[in-house]
Image: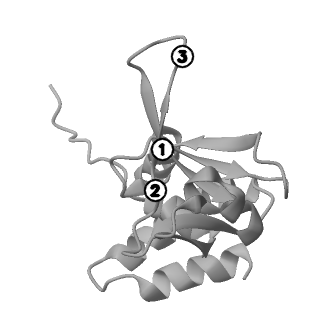
């Protein structure tokens, strides 16, 4: 599924509460970020209850500083090579890249996504910060729905 098809699925599957219009508005932001990644889908580790596996990373140089990330793998095999996948209660699920980005916006507990781009290499990934995604989405929302500025400012 190419990026446009992925966006169409997000729109079609959106609740009928205005979310579809929101997806249409932020689609350029999702496509922009997704277009910077190498794969159209990634494998996400999740529990049997379908919760995405969240990994907390600690900063050895700054004790007490932590970051919560979700890893996205280019292949199922790479996902199952991850140490977290050794748990029998964890499975790797293929998810379209735009859907991963869209989901991250709603995950308050996630600081970033790490996309492993090279098959077989789990040492280096591309990190997308949740804050950066939110900022980009907000820019698209402001373009479509500019704030009302009163002409009676005095």
Marks 3/1: CA distance? Answer: 22 Å
Q: Residues within 10 Å of mark 1 (few under 14, many from 20)?
A: many
* Disc 3 target residue: 60
The residue lying at 72 percent from left, 82 percent from top is: 1
* Disc 2 target residue: 104
Indicate which disc, 3 or 1, sits on the residue closer to the N terminus.
3
Side of 146 where 129 appears, left or right: right
The residue lying at 67 percent from left, 62 percent from top is: 79
State yes or no: discs 1 and 2 in contact (Cβ < 8 Å).
yes
Q: Quadrant of residue 111?
A: top left
Q: Is residue 32 above or below residue 9?
A: above
Which one is in front in this view, the residue at disc 3 or the one at disc 1?
Answer: 3
Residue 52 visible: yes
Residue 40 visible: no
* Disc 1 target residue: 130
Q: Residues within 10 Å of mark 3 (few under 14, many from 20)?
A: few
- The label shown at residue 3 is none
Name the element at disc 2. helix
What count of labels does the image hold?
3
Give the residue at the far top of this rendering.
Answer: 61
């Amino acid at each position: 599924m190419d990026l446009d098809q992925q966006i169409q699925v997000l729109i079609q599957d959106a609740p009928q509460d205005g979310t579809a219009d929101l997806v249409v508005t932020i689609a350029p932001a999702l496509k922009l970020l997704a277009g910077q990644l190498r794969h159209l889908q990634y494998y996400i580790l999740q529990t049997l209850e379908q919760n995405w596996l969240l990994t907390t990373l600690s900063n050895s140089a700054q004790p007490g500083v932590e970051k919560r990330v979700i890893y996205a793998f280019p292949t199922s095999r790479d996902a199952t090579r991850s140490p977290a996948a050794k748990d029998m209660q964890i499975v790797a699920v293929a998810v379209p890249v735009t859907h991963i980005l869209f989901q991250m916006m709603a995950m308050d507990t996630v600081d970033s996504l790490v996309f492993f781009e090279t098959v077989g290499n789990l040492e280096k990934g591309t990190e997308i910060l949740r804050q950066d995604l939110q900022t980009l989405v907000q820019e698209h929302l402001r373009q479509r729905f500019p704030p009302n500025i009163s002409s009676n400012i005095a």
